[in-house]
Image (cartoon, rainbow, N blue to C red):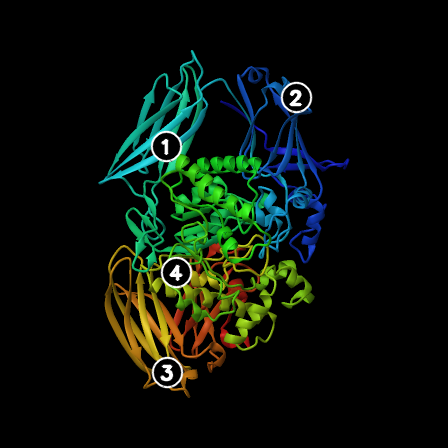
Amino acid sequence: MRQINLNGTWQMKSVGSSENLKVLVPGTVMNDLLCHGRIDDPFYRDNERFAYDIASKDYVYIRDFIVEEELIQSENIILRFEGLDTLAEIKINEYSVAKTHNMHRIYEFDVKSFLVPGLNKLQVTLFSPIQYISKKQTEEKLWGVGDAIEGYPHLRKGHSMFGWDWGPQIPDLGIWRDVSLLAWNTGRIEDVYITQDHRDNEVGVNVRVKIETRPNHAVNLKVKMTSPSGMEDSFHIDDALSEETVSFNVANPQLWWPNNYGEQPLYKVEVISSDQSDVLDEKVLNIGLRTIKVKHEPDQWGKSFEFEVNGLSIFAMGANYIPEDSIIARYSKERTEQLLNDCVEANFNMVRVWGGGIYPEDYFFDLCDQKGIIVWQDFMFACSMYGLNDDFRKNVEQEVIDNVKRIRHHASLGIWCGNNEVEEAWVYWGIPGEGYKYKADYIKLFEFIIPELIKELDPHTFYWSSSPSSGGGFNEPRNPNEGDMHYWEVWHGLKPFSEYEKYHFRFCSEFGFQSFPSMKTINTFTEPEDRNIFSYVMEKHQKNGAANGKILFYLSENFLYPKDFDSLVYASQLLQAEAIKYGVEHWRRNRGRCMGSLYWQLNDCWPVASWSSLDYFGRWKALHYFAKKFYAPVLMSLREEGSDVEIHVTNDSLSTIEARIEWKLRKNNSEILAQGNVQTEVNNLAAKQCERLSLDKYITEENKRNIYIECALYVNGKHTSVSTLMFTKPKHFNFIDPELTFNVIDKIDTFEITISSQAFAKYIEIDLKAADCKFSDNYFDLSRGEVRTVRVKKESLSESLSLESFKDQLQLRSVYDIV
């Protein structure tokens, strides 16, 4: 196999223009124009509005390349596009090769007849997605979400590129993944499919290989597997058939586990085809030895929905992942790795790839394999109506084939899901029009066509037709006792946080609460006069209609009115963190009945007010620091009922633990009114109510605004966490000025911060005025007489700081400072 890489420098221009710009492929039009200064930053202020006109034009990408005479003599020559976004016509030497209409597919075209020895010209014309969907929508009206440009379901392109209730309308276009020319005579490896058979202390690994062969030309096959410790095992097959299966028996296998349940050892499988003189082709796949099942079975509460890994039922902990940038050309492995490192640091074991975006890059799954993050993979359909004509069906079938074959070998892949919220939309959202034909099309596509392909291509991975769902067929997709659930009454329904306790969902795969990003992030897209949440620019960076008003509603329910814009931003993040914490802790207390929580959402695609816990620049909001605590393998959670307090411990580790809880009932000045301790054993993979304290002799209607309880958890003798609980809302609690102080010690690799308080301080936020970094802890509570030590790894700093510079930039505040 010979390969000519066609990435690199191309020429790009809009159709009708005489100006060619030198650009890089892979890339996108918006990024190319931005890099050349032809457009302003579309994320700044209201510049998004110019994107519509840019995406309404057609563009041409051109490059020359050399083909040697020897390569021309190859029997097979194909042009391979890993990703074209989206409507394209490909020409070689002015001859039309093909047209494309799906950004989610991999395209290969036979171009042997179009090539000449020497200089060749490759031209890709990209046609406006807006013009296309506008025309299609006049011919056949398809319903979709109101925040997106109308007609987007007509095109197999990431839906959210047309706008969503957290994303801008920037329907970029481009050659967004690798381009190459491949030439060979025989021996090309067409497909590698790996399955596993798990037995007692042994795993059978079966490698099925499909090879392109030709008569009278023997192709040899070698399949080699290398263990994580470097031990090799291999098979050689002379004169291989077009399909061969090689099996390895792995004794004492090193099993792959999700984050916090074990290690992530990976075995390397190499498949090499050759003839008597040379290697013809090779593929390398890394696999993890594990079983992942989704149990959807009748039980005492309805029907379960839980992930079972290597025979153990785990509680899924994580969030929903959306596209990392509205300008795809800015994607990078380094950026994705940082995002997933932040997931690991916050104790995630799962992310859900949401169906309104794009299928992630190969490196996304590689990183999830390495870090123990199970991937819930939606197919790219969301909140929309689809017309299932023959062309659409064939297009989608090939999209499914391309992506399932590309992704299926990954240890991290846990589930295939047909779509996001389409079944729910048909049942509950009141889709306009008759819709009977489209409703039938839904059943055909998501409950017959795609699952049949999964049975053929990846039968060992569980398929779920929609999220949320109780099992398909439009049968109560919001049934809280069966399947997975998206719950939005807290937030969209303006219900109080306590509403979460009314539901014991089997698996909550979406629930969320908005906040504003940090002031540093807001400053990147605003001018000083914009910094009011109801300003024109701030509302342009709030895509969820009345959301700013909802934040203020919940603010009025929980906090005193903030003194300034910065304090309002801070308070919004506290609201978000407390809301999600309330739900997660409740469901983890009910482990066994509920077996997963994936909050909406992990990340942002531009700087915006949203449901994310990590903003566009990767800055941790209060929610992400909270997630690190409420997703800890061993969680202590407190539940108040009047003047009674329940103390719960949820143990998601693999070992039984000895838990000791020291509790102290304190006044607002941290004076101790009563105290005690609880000693108990908590089984592995279980939740337990350890104590119920009746404190009515200490708490009255008159003094409850001055009293809180503090509980410290010790696991197997080691102090792990502290939680506090107040008996009234923060806005009614009588906080005293905590007079926070700090000291910083310069260690070799870290700055070590010690923080003290003169009274009860709630939600202590640590930040640097200009630089960015990650703190080992943040947004925590502190009593007088206690000291909290927080560490900052110097490698996490956005700029190098001396001890004095670090101390000068360090700033603290607590809820007391909101007013």
Mark sitting earlier along the chain (3/4): 4
Snapshot quadrant of residue 205: top left
Residue 119 spot, x, y in % from top left: 66, 21
Q: Is residue 746 visible?
A: no
Label 2 sits on what residue type? Leu
Residue 176 spot, x, y in % from top left: 58, 39
Marks 1/2: CA distance? 38 Å
Residue 369 spot, x, y in % from top left: 40, 43
Mark sitting earlier along the chain (4/1): 1
**322 displayed left or right of 163:** left
- To which residue does mark 4 refer? 505
Marks 4/1: CA distance? 40 Å
Mark sitting earlier along the chain (1/2): 2
**283 displayed left or right of 156:** left
Numbered label attached to residue 671: 3
Q: Is residue 643 above or below residue 745?
A: below
- To which residue does mark 1 refer? 269
Label 1 sits on what residue type? Val
Label 4 sits on what residue type? Phe
Residue at 33% x, 22% y: name it. 236
Q: Nearer the viewer, mark 4 or mark 1?
A: 4
Snapshot quadrant of residue 689: bottom left
Callout 4 touching callout 2 (CB < 8 Å): no
Numbered label attached to residue 18: none
